[in-house]
């Protein structure tokens, strides 16, 4: 079989074009193309009349895709049960997580004893483990590496594991501590979060600014999830006031969420400080695949930059809409949600309906993802 060495020249839109030449003694060739850390193989038949030592030009069209990892809210009792019936990676990952954390992760996820799966110190490592299990199942099925990675809030830790910047065991321990620190940062009932539907981003910012007064009465945008869907967080009374301000500005809905901590706002600064201390003792590495971070939808290529982004993420907004648009602008047209649910898949479709969004949470999703990226 001949070998074609190809070079990719990026063109506008969602495809890339590779051109190569072959010198060989067979009428079939395997193309190997490397561009922007993308690797793929295509077997083609050569036109009739090509013989040994003839040189030809081949154009290859390839769809680029991104892999996305969910955060809190994607968990559910029994998550990944169906995928676990077909993919050994699920049980293997639960077992590995159990060894690291000292409790039975498979039992926690399957039975949710005492509702612990909804307590953030258990939720966070459970979701990291679930998303890593889906990633391992994807690779075991022959899935290729994406062009870009990103995680929503907590999911950023999973993205860094997949990118090779953070060990799985360290991610489990860090996210358990992260959950504990977040819970301890605010007294029960003192903080709140609310979803505001039907206002543009600037109007939500204005609603928060209109009611925030000082460090004892704060509310700010926490998650810019999709156009017309923004989550705010802060002191409970301030969140209530911001919701009323949003309704007066024309919001279709402003509803408080059932959460235990007000994430991604100024109330999380004590947790961010504690996390910064812990991160200094963790072995972080430069990622092998680019990860777009929540705080600015940009990638980091230094350990210091990654550490700073993880700390800043705790008390700053998650710019999810900007992250998906940045991926689209880098020619990614397929977005694969690598986790136990389809929360991000729904958000991504609202951000840009032209994007193909697929959740890999079960065998059907895996097959769809493989077909979309073949």
Image (cartoon, rainbow, N blue to C red):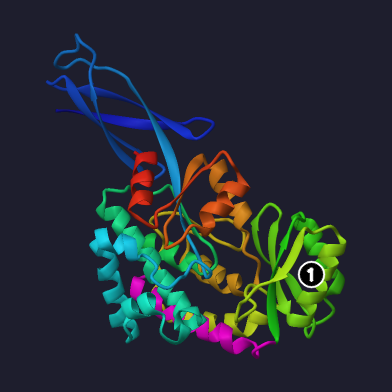
Compared with residue 248, is residue 262 higher up or lower down, i.e. above or below?
below
Compared with residue 20, is residue 313 higher up or lower down, i.e. above or below?
below
Query: Is residue 280 something that shows in the picture?
Result: no
Compared with residue 174, is residue 24 higher up or lower down, i.e. above or below?
above
* Magenta extent: 167-189
Q: Where is residue 309 shown, x and y percent of the image?
A: 56, 68
270 vs 62, left or right, is right
Quarter of the image for the C terminus: give it: top left
Which residue is rendered at x = 13% and y = 21% of the image?
Answer: 26
Query: Is residue 102 something that shows in the picture?
Result: yes
Q: Most prominent secondary structure in the magenta stretch?
A: helix
Which residue is rendered at x = 39% and y = 40% of the image?
Answer: 372
Which residue is rendered at x = 57% and y = 56% of the image?
Answer: 298
Helix, strand or loop for disc 1 = helix
Q: Where is residue 296 shown, x and y percent of the image?
A: 62, 59
Question: Quarter of the image holding residue 240?
Answer: bottom right
Check disc 1 and report the residue beneath it: 243
290 vs 197, left or right, is left
Q: Where is residue 104 shown, x and y percent of the image?
A: 31, 82
Quarter of the image for the N terminus: give it: top left
Q: Is residue 183 magenta?
A: yes
Which residue is rendered at x = 62% and y = 87% of the image?
Answer: 185
């Amino acid at each position: 079989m001949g070998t074609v060495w190809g070079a990719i020249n990026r063109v506008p839109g969602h495809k890339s074009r590779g051109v190569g030449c072959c010198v060989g003694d067979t009428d079939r060739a395997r193309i190997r193309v490397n561009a922007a850390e993308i690797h793929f193989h295509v077997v083609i038949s050569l036109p009739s009349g090509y013989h040994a030592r003839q040189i030809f030009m081949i154009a290859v069209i390839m769809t680029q895709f991104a892999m996305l990892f969910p955060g809190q809210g994607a968990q559910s009792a029994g998550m990944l049960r169906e995928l676990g019936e077909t993919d050994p990676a699920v049980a293997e990952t639960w077992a590995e997580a159990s060894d690291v954390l000292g409790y039975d992760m498979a039992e926690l996820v399957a039975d949710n004893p005492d509702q612990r799966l909804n307590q953030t110190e258990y939720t966070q490592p459970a979701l990291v483990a679930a998303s890593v299990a889906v990633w391992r199942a994807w690779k075991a099925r022959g899935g290729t590496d994406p062009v870009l990675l990103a995680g929503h809030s907590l999911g950023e830790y999973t993205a860094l594991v997949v990118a090779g910047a953070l060990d799985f065991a360290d991610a489990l321990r860090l996210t358990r501590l992260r959950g504990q620190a977040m819970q301890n940062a605010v007294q029960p009932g003192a903080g709140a979060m609310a979803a505001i539907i039907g206002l543009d981003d600037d109007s939500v910012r204005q609603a928060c600014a209109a009611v925030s007064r000082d460090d004892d009465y704060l509310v700010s945008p926490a998650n810019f999830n999709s156009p017309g869907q923004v989550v705010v967080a802060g002191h409970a009374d301030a969140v209530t006031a911001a919701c009323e301000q949003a309704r007066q500005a024309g919001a279709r809905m402003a509803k408080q969420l059932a959460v235990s901590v007000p994430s991604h706002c100024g109330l999380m600064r004590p947790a961010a400080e504690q996390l910064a201390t812990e991160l200094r003792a963790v072995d972080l590495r430069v990622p092998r695949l680019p990860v777009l971070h929540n705080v600015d939808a940009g990638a980091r290529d230094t350990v210091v930059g990654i550490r700073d982004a993880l700390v800043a993420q705790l008390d700053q907004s998650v710019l999810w809409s900007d992250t998906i648009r940045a991926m689209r602008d880098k020619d990614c047209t397929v977005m694969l949600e690598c986790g136990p649910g389809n929360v991000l898949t729904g958000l991504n479709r609202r951000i840009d309906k032209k994007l193909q969004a697929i959740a890999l949470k079960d065998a059907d999703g895996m097959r769809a993802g493989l077909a979309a990226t073949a």
